[in-house]
Image (spheres, rainbow, N blue to C red):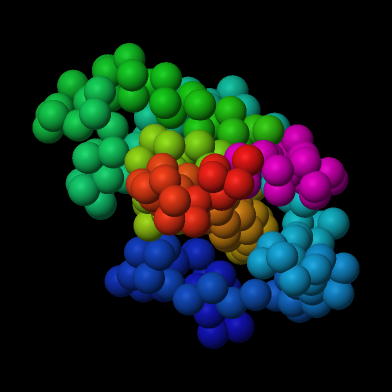
Amino acid sequence: MGCALSGSGVAPGKTISESKWCPSAENQLASKVGAEHGGDGTGADPFPLAEGQKKRIQESWRFLHDNIARVGIIVFIRLFETHPECKDVFFLFRDIDDLQQLKMNKELQAHGLRVMSFIEKSVARLDQEDKLEHLAFELGRSHYRYNAPPKYYEYVGIQFISAVQPILKERWTPAVEEAWQSLFKYLTATMKRGYYEEEEKSGSIKSLGLRKPGTGSILNSI
């Protein structure tokens, strides 16, 4: 096929994030259908997964479920190795530089489990697109309140895919990888919408609070 997914999933000499994603005909069809039915002009991304891709994600998750605690730790250790600036978001353990010590950190373990729980809920809602969108959108809104900027969101999906490949072994195929990539792309985009909406709303509230009486604040008209 001439893309990263036609071989091992990663082009030689490149990381997953650097490799080009080459969507299959199935994925292109799913995007077309999503655009026809989801393009409501609200900025929401069309749901990108075809039925076959949903099944691949659901089947692979069943094999991953017993390892979610381990996967959660691996994801964040690799995240901090590749993007150490991400640690600045986590004040509870951002000063821990020893990765072995970080692996045993209870706060990191708990956060890893929360992320895996979000992925589990997302997989459970693949056939309920409105609920899946709401889940990711609200998570994006809460991340604004946690001061966790959107530039970090896509890193988690990349490290998740790297972490689960050796666990699934021969069950990990280019088609499975593409399905997971498409899901994370959708979740990331939806979380970003939630983040920016919350940012805009908070900015509006702050600007109203800074206005002096008699300068046109809507509070004066109540």
Q: In the figure, 166 relative to 26: above or below? A: above
At horizontal 59% and vertical 23% (from top left) the residue drawn is 66
On the rendered image, what quadrant is the C terminus found in? top right
Asked where in the image residue 28 lies, by quadrant, the reply is bottom right
Q: Is residue 126 visible?
A: yes
On the rendered image, what quadrant is the N terminus found in? bottom right
Horizontal side of residue 62 vs 19, given as left or right: right
Q: Position of residue 90 (x, y in %)?
A: 28, 32
Magenta highlight range: 122-138
Asked where in the image residue 24 lies, by quadrant, the reply is bottom right
At horizontal 75% and vertical 71% (from top left) the residue drawn is 41
At horizontal 84% and vertical 45% (from top left) the residue drawn is 127
Q: Is residue 203 visible?
A: no
Does the magenta run of residues contain 135? yes
At horizontal 58% and vertical 28% (from top left) the residue drawn is 117
Seen as rendered, the residue at the extreme front is 214
Q: In the figure, 100 relative to 222: above or below? A: above
Q: In the figure, 46 relative to 154: above or below? A: below
Q: Position of residue 44 (x, y in %)?
A: 69, 63
What is the chief secondary structure element of the magenta stretch?
helix
Q: Position of residue 220 (x, y in %)?
A: 54, 45
Horizontal side of residue 157 vs 88, given as left or right: right
